[in-house]
Image (cartoon, helix red, strand yellow):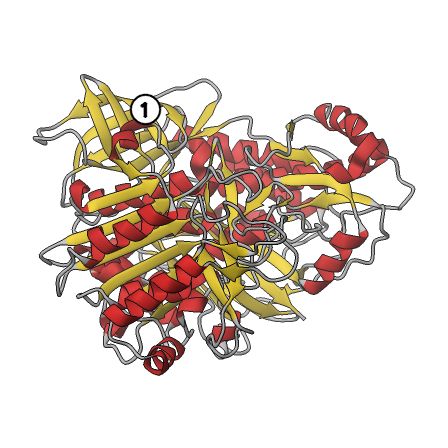
């Protein structure tokens, strides 16, 4: 299968990282160092965290950058052992527990002063240094810059960087990548990590997302660095004793020191996205969440590759291309180093205690997946764990605001402390009435009111305002010339006419085959799309139970192309990872599968008890396809996998096979491994297969090639998934009963999810 192309990275890499001089030579090998490096026995660990939301309106305000700062702070302190006083925060005011830790507002002077005084002046050889920036990015002119960048240099944008900018005065006070290179070069330690969550590929909004790039609406043509910025660079070039030629050579060869992680390539968008009731950078959320979940001494390949895959998964669901980038200093031995140059001294976890007051507890949900965040509002149950991962108490969740959770302490052993105790998921409380959140795009114009009223009348469809503050699953709108043109540049061929009504992702990318005739009314369009939306809702329900990274059920999943062999994807539950049976992942991003490829899925039961296995696909149209079981005359027997046994689907020697159909697009694989038979759900899945006309032993082509009938005329898919939640709820070992919630127990279910890209 195709690997990431690493050549010409300097021309393609996004964020300020590209401008510092990144190459992609070591892209797939480096992220694991970020987490491992943070826990080394060094004399000191220093961090500077910068987050900016409250830009002037002319620049474009953001919403998720302060959340990024909180996520990074909690990760560094409670997973990697940083001292709070060694972390400096330069940001807008932060509400809540970190309100007193903001040292100064994010002006240019304050950011540069903190880089000099907190990092350069304090860090000694062998110390660990982390610099995290979340905010806008931009591009400015650079004379004699790095070849391949067309005389442009990436920047980070302080809150006051655009004061006084006009059509006549095009000089900006941004901090250039060249400046960051010089400051990084001045550090006495090589254990340096730069994390930049910004982009340069267009700003403003796209659908329901805010993009972290300045639009420069006030300006026409090129913008230039200020005289102040150029003088600052000249000063540090002298302090570093670097000639102009030597500086050019160093920048062209790579970054100055350590490692650098960026949110996207230079021609891609970095999203400031809504997750539940809060916003965050998609990259920052997934990076910190992944490092909370990291098990053991992971290899560099595994960690950053999995982070890249997760970021692309989330971006694809919003209709964006966002591929994180990574680089290490040239001629270094950092290939064997961990992420952030530290090994995590504490166990993997989903949350950390912020405060205990009697039986009331406040905690930070930094390790919870964005796809399942709604299942951690009320009714979830956590185990408090000690430094070895052993349970020492139980917490029942009663509420959540953003990523801060609230709960009741049910039991608690002696810990000697309040803040900093880690928490692991035991039971999640999935809403029993999950709905599909649909927004009305502005392209519907005068028909928007009718669309809202018509959608609101559909059961389990919630109409959501498109204001970049609330999560949206899909947008209803008209296909426009500009959207059709942009879709073509992203490899999506739209045969539907301009003016037709259909569905878009949150990032305003058209959903394949969802558009009708150009003269179709909004009422008729909603009626036509109703079955599709119900299938999409079924997919959302399935994703809400995905818990492969947190499950205590010891199981492995492997996906292999039949003709060529070689593992496309290998996943193991946390129990399998902690047992040392499997690395966290060995896949390299979103895997590409050619149309016509036949695949096998293998599931290994490493438990001492029976497991019951079901395998499903959600294709790019939102249709649900059952891959296993297929022998409905003996379905319960077919799903059973005994201890130590391995299920291969389709089974060797059978006439049944799974073939990837066209056209190009994406599909999601879902594997359910339960310690209990899911009888109601199994009966429902059988009805899906029968509705498609699939009989035992039939070859199955999923994608466009599947032309059999379907059950898309009613609510059956949603009812089937509700039955699955009912099965899981009955099997969960929880004494907590919350109205409107269905429990899913990590000790009794492992649910894996993976996205694949279909290519012609």
The quadrant the C terminus occupies is bottom right
Instruction: Between residue 588 and residue 274, name the one nearer to us.
Output: 274
**327 relative position to 218: left or right:** left
**136 relative position to 408: left or right:** right
Instruction: Between residue 624 and residue 116, name the one nearer to us.
Output: 116
Instruction: Between residue 649 and residue 439, name the one nearer to us.
Output: 439
Question: Badge 1 is on which residue?
Answer: 406
> Which residue is pictured at 77% across the width and 40% down the height?
443
> Which residue is pictured at 50% across the width and 54% down the height?
172
Q: Where is 741 relative to 208, above or below?
A: above
**578 relative position to 9: left or right:** left
Q: Where is 738 relative to 420, above or below?
A: above
Q: How many residues crowd around disc 1 within 10 Å: few (fewer than 14), some, or many (20 or more)? A: many
Identity of the residue furthest to the right in this view: 519
Q: Position of residue 417 (x, y in %)?
A: 11, 30
Q: Position of residue 134 (x, y in %)?
A: 41, 48
> Which residue is pictured at 29% across the width and 42% down the height?
89
> Which residue is pictured at 42% across the width and 73% down the height?
24
Quarter where residue 461 is shown? top right
Q: Position of residue 684 (x, y in %)?
A: 60, 38
């Amino acid at each position: 299968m195709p690997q990431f192309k690493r050549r010409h990275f300097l021309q393609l890499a996004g964020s300020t990282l590209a401008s510092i001089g990144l190459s992609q030579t070591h892209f797939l090998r480096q992220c694991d160092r970020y987490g491992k490096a943070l826990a080394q026995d060094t004399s000191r660990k220093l961090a500077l965290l910068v987050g900016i939301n409250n830009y002037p309106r002319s620049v474009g305000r953001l919403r998720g950058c302060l959340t990024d700062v909180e996520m990074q702070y909690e990760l560094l302190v409670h997973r990697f052992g940083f001292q709070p006083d060694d972390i400096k925060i330069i940001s807008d005011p932060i509400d809540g527990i970190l309100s007193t830790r903001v040292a100064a507002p994010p002006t240019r002077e304050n950011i540069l002063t903190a880089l000099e005084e907190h990092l350069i002046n304090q860090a000694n050889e062998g110390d660990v240094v982390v610099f995290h920036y979340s905010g806008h990015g931009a591009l400015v002119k650079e004379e004699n810059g790095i070849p391949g960048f067309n005389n442009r240099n990436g920047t980070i944008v302080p809150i006051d960087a655009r004061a006084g900018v006009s059509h006549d005065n095009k000089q900006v006070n941004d901090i250039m990548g060249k400046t960051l290179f010089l400051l990084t070069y001045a550090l006495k330690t090589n254990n340096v990590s730069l994390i930049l969550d910004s982009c340069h590929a267009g700003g403003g909004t796209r659908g329901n997302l805010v993009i972290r790039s300045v639009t420069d609406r006030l300006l026409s043509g090129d913008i230039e660095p200020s005289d102040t910025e150029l003088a600052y660079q000249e000063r540090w070039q002298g302090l570093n004793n670097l000639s102009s030629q030597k500086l050019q050579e160093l920048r062209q060869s790579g970054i100055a020191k350590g490692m650098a992680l960026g949110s996207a390539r230079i021609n891609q968008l970095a999203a400031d996205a809504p997750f539940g009731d809060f916003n965050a950078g998609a990259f920052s959320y997934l990076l910190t969440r992944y490092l909370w979940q990291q098990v053991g001494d992971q290899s560099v390949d595994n960690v950053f590759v999995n982070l890249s895959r997760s970021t692309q998964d989330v971006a694809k669901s919003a209709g964006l291309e966002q591929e994180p980038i990574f680089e290490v200093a040239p001629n270094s031995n950092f290939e064997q180093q961990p992420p952030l140059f530290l090994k995590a001294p504490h166990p993997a976890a989903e949350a950390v205690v912020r405060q205990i007051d009697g039986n009331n507890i406040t905690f930070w949900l930094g390790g919870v997946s964005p796809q399942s965040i709604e299942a951690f509002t009320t009714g979830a149950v956590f185990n408090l764990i000690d430094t070895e991962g052993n349970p020492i108490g139980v917490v029942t969740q009663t509420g959540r605001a953003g990523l801060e959770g609230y709960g009741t302490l049910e039991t608690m052993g002696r810990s000697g402390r309040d803040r900093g105790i880690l928490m692991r998921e035991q039971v999640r409380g999935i809403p029993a009435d999950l709905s599909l959140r649909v927004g009305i795009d502005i392209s519907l114009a005068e028909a928007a009111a009718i669309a809202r009223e018509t959608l609101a009348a559909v059961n389990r469809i919630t109409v959501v305002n498109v204001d970049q503050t609330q999560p949206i699953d899909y947008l209803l709108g008209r296909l426009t010339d500009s959207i059709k043109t942009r879709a073509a540049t992203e490899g999506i061929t739209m045969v539907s006419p301009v003016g037709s009504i259909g569905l878009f992702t949150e990032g305003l990318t058209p959903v394949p085959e969802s558009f009708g005739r150009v003269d179709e009314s909004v009422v008729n369009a909603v009626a036509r799309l109703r079955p599709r939306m119900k299938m999409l809702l079924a997919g959302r329900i399935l994703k809400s139970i995905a818990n492969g990274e947190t499950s205590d059920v010891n199981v492995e999943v492997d996906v292999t192309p039949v003709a060529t062999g070689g593992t496309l994807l290998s996943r193991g539950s946390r129990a399998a990872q902690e047992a040392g049976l499997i690395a966290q992942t060995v896949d390299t991003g979103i895997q590409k599968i050619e149309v016509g490829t036949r695949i096998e899925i293998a599931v290994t039961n490493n438990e001492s008890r029976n497991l019951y296995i079901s395998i499903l696909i959600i294709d790019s149209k939102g249709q649900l396809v059952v891959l296993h079981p297929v022998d409905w005359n003996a379905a319960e027997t077919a799903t059973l996998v005994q201890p130590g046994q391995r299920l291969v689907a389709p089974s060797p020697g059978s006439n049944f096979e799974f073939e990837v159909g066209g056209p190009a697009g994406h599909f999601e694989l879902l594997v359910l491994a339960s310690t209990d038979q899911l009888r109601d759900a199994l009966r429902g899945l059988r009805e899906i297969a029968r509705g498609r006309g699939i009989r035992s032993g039939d070859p199955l082509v999923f994608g466009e090639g599947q032309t059999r009938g379907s059950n898309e005329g009613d609510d059956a898919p949603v009812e089937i998934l509700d039955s699955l939640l009912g099965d899981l709820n009955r099997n969960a070992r929880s004494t907590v009963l919350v109205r409107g919630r269905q429990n899913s127990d990590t000790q009794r279910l492992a649910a894996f999810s993976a996205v694949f890209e279909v290519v012609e």
